[in-house]
Structure formats: structure tokens, C-alpha cells
Image (cartoon, grey):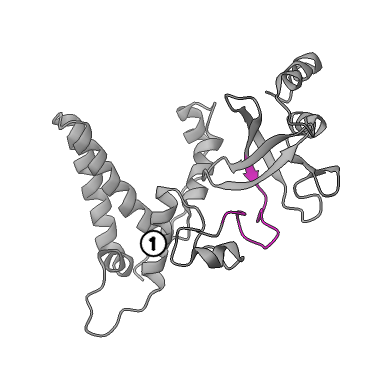
Amino acid sequence: MAAAAEPEQIEKFLDGLKYDDKGLVVAIAQDVDTGAILMQGFADRTAVRSTITKRQATFFSRSRQAQWTKGETSGNFISVKSIHLDCDKDSLIYLGVPDGPTCHTGAHTCYYSQVDGDDGAAAVEGGGKHGQEEALTTLYELEETIQKRRTEAVKEGDKPSWTRKLLDNPELLCKKIREEAGELCETLENDEGKERAASEMADVLYHSMVLLNLQGVGMEDVLAKLRGRFGTSGVEEKANRPPKSKQAHRTG
């Protein structure tokens, strides 16, 4: 449902929702780039209408019995890019971009406690740790693992992990990225099949993410760039890129 939709279209959509006995539907906010579930609330007809027209995630507070827009107090709004309806028409997803932490505790997402982890009871009691038990998709779990390898101390006499070797040796890292990219191209040139192509692409992604870690770039930054290119031709996008800066090759 687009913000520019005619009022009649919006009202027809709102008429079709299956509200509960309190006039509410479930409303879930999801990060458009990371896929993270940010929060879950409820929305009445007015809150859904406001979300559609103003493109800010808006809910209905059952405790205060009032409409509220996420961020109206904290400033951490969720800018809604699209809205999705489930098959039963009683639940919505607000797919958007958070301006900051979504949870009132300061966590990126309200879902930062893993109940089937080492201590599920602690999670129920509010003992989850921000950033350590957050529900992560595959790429973000890998990103977190790479960061852990970078910060963990290597004990004297222990062999460093492959990731740590790459982090400590940018020359080796760049060599591996070029090598893996070449092998990915060979899967097409030599008709090596889907499984081989997927395997080589996994290698390219992994090594590239190690490089991004060294440069302080997150996958969220990359995905935001990709999202910004939707609807823009590749030729036009490349022509509008700023010129490359001539910086000294990093060796540390």
C-alpha cells in the first residue's frame, strides 16, 4: 500500500483487515536491510492509516489506550518503506529503516534474548545481553564472528584462526579475494554447476566481509547502498559515484 494511494483505496484496505475484538491487528516492524525483527506491537485502524500515509511506524498502546508513533519520545523513528499483510489478514509487517535502537533498553532490536541458549531462564527474567543473543540472519552472524576473531586475544603458542590470519595480513586477504573471485567466474566459464558456484560465492562473501571489517564497513552499509540503487540504471549510478580517493595502501 503506497503513501500516494487514493483515500478510497486506503479505506478499502483498512476495511479488509481482520481486527480482533478490541479492533487491533498485530504489527511487526522489520529492518528492510538486515531482516532483523525490530519489535512487535498492535495497531488499530487509525494507526495503520497513519503508517500508510506518513510512512512512520505507528502503533496502538493497549496500556495507554492511545496511538503512538515509534520514536516520538526517543527520536528513534522507523521510516516505513513497504507494508505487508499476512494470509489471514490479521497481521502486518512494517518493513523499514530504524533511525536508532528500537528497544527501550537501548538494544537494536527488542529480540535480544535467546531462550534456547545456554541460560533460557535468564532470558525470561530479562537477563539477555545486548548484541550477544540477538536474532541474527546468516550474514550477520558471520559478521559478528569475524569481529570476535578480530578482538579476541591469541594465546602464546596457539595457532591463530584463518580469519585472524587474514585480519593481520591485508596483503594475503586481498590476494585471496582476487583468487576466489576468479574461481567464481570459472564456475560459469567451465559450466561447473550450481553447487560449485554457490560454494565459490560463499568464499567470495566471507573473504570480502573480512576486508569490510578492516575498513569499518558493515553489511548493513552495503545493503543500504544496494537498496539505494533500486530503480536506477547501472550506467547512471556508476557515473554519479564520487571519484576514488588516492590514499596510501594500508599495510597495518
According to the picture, the residue beneath numbered tag 1 turns out to be 145
Between 48 and 54, the residue placed more toward the observer is: 48
Residue at 29%, 83% in the rendered image: 155
Query: Within the image, what quadrant is residue 12 found in?
Result: top right
Q: Is residue 21 left or right of residue 38?
A: right
Residue at 52%, 33% in the rendered image: 229
Residue 178 lies, in percent from the top left, at 25, 49
Q: Is residue 37 left or right of residue 156?
A: right
Q: Is residue 168 left or right of residue 94?
A: left
Q: Is residue 170 above or below residue 224?
A: below
Q: Is residue 158 above or below residue 71?
A: below
Quadrant of the frame with the N terminus? top right
Q: Is residue 219 above or below residue 226?
A: below
Between 99 and 51, the residue placed more toward the observer is: 51
Residue 232 part of the magenta segment: no
Give the residues in magenta.
96-111
Residue at 67%, 56% in the rendered image: 103
Residue 207 lies, in percent from the top left, at 31, 54
Residue 133 lies, in percent from the top left, at 50, 61
> From where the camera sits, is residue 116 visible?
yes
> From where the camera sits, is residue 129 visible?
no
